[in-house]
Image (cartoon, rainbow, N blue to C red):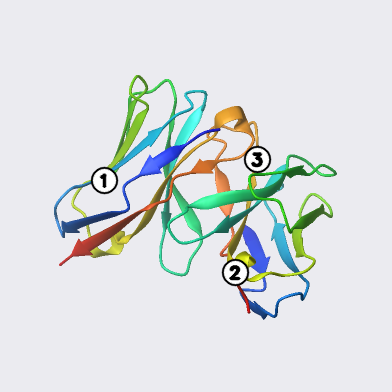
């Protein structure tokens, strides 16, 4: 089945850029997603990218997709303390349901 | 719109007890899902329902049953709870066929089995 991998932890200073990386094994996903989870809350969709795109920009967020290497990244520009959360990468192989990575905890230091 | 709602928010059970987790969505979505979230493991799919009247097993279905009562509601039942079922349970819904196909999540139910 699909395997989605993420690093567990990232620490940055406020105002710096954050880059969260994700790799996946199944290339059949039509869309790839980034979700954000704040403490004690559910998952909130941040952004998604269609599989035939290389890049998508949405305000401070930039998603890069390298289909050849099966690599997805999320860049957050001008990271703020309110961006501290767990970020999940997700794919939808076979369109049945999403397959999630284990999440990257982003810590933003003032 | 309330989106996806879940009840209860918290629950403590003893081993062997049963309970039903409730989920409802008011977005007229076709598909609904139950996931569990354990530390360091992301979300794992328990069961899903592609449309009213259908349900299918996900990655970790053992020890659970589901009912798609109508288009709005999708419940998850633990017949005989075990400590290994201590987790945070999330319900989600999706309107397949629209651009993005994104899933919308409820706030979660935090279950502890003693």
Q: What is the CA distance from the residue labelled 1 to the residue labelled 2?
A: 37 Å
| Place of residue B1 in the rendered image (x, y in percent of width and height, measured from the top left) | 63, 59
Q: Residues within 10 Å of mark 1 (few under 14, many from 20)?
A: few
On the picture, is A110 further left or further right than A92? Answer: left
Occupied quadrant, residue A79: bottom left
Q: Residues within 10 Å of mark 2 (few under 14, many from 20)?
A: some
Q: Nearer the viewer, residue B76 or B59?
A: B59
Q: Secondary structure at mark 2?
A: loop
Question: Residue B86, which numbered label?
Answer: 2
Question: Residue B95, which numbered label?
Answer: 3
Residue name at image x 26 percent, y 46 percent: A60
Q: Are marks 1 and 2 on the same chain?
A: no
Occupied quadrant, residue A108: bottom left
Q: Are marks 3 and 1 on the same chain?
A: no
Q: Nearer the viewer, residue B9 or B97?
A: B9
| Place of residue A49 in the rendered image (x, y in percent of width and height, measured from the top left) | 42, 32
Q: Quadrant of the C terminus of chain B?
A: bottom right
Residue for badge 1: A60
| Place of residue A46 in the rendered image (x, y in percent of width and height, measured from the top left) | 41, 47
Q: Chain of mark 3?
A: B
Q: Chain of mark 2?
A: B
Q: What is the CA distance from the residue labelled 3 to the residue labelled 1?
A: 27 Å
| Place of residue A76 in the rendered image (x, y in percent of width and height, measured from the top left) | 25, 47
Q: What is the CA distance from the residue labelled 2 to the residue labelled 3?
A: 29 Å
Establish if B100 lies above or below B68. Answer: above
Q: Are marks 2 and 3 on the same chain?
A: yes
């Amino acid at each position: 089945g699909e395997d989605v991998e993420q690093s567990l932890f990232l620490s940055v200073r406020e105002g710096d850029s954050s880059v969260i990386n994700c790799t996946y094994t199944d290339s059949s996903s039509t869309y790839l997603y980034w979700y954000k989870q704040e403490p004690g809350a559910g998952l909130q969709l941040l952004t998604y990218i269609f599989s035939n795109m290389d890049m998508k920009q949405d305000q401070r967020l930039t998603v890069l997709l390298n289909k050849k290497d099966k690599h997805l990244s999320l860049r957050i520009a001008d990271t703020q303390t309110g961006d501290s959360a767990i970020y999940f990468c997700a794919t939808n192989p076979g369109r049945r349901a999403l397959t999630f990575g284990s999440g990257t905890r982003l810590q933003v230091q003032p | 719109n309330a989106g996806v709602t879940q009840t209860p928010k918290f629950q403590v059970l003893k081993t062997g007890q049963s309970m039903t987790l409730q989920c409802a969505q008011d977005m007229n979505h076709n598909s609904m899902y139950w996931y569990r979230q354990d530390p360091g493991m992301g979300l794992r799919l328990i069961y899903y329902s592609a449309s009213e009247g259908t349900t299918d097993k996900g990655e970790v279905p053992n020890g659970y049953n589901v009912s798609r009562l109508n288009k709005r509601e999708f419940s998850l039942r633990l017949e005989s709870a075990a400590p290994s079922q201590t987790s945070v349970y999330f319900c989600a819904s999706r309107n397949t066929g629209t651009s993005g196909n994104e899933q919308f999540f409820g706030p979660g139910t935090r279950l502890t089995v003693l």
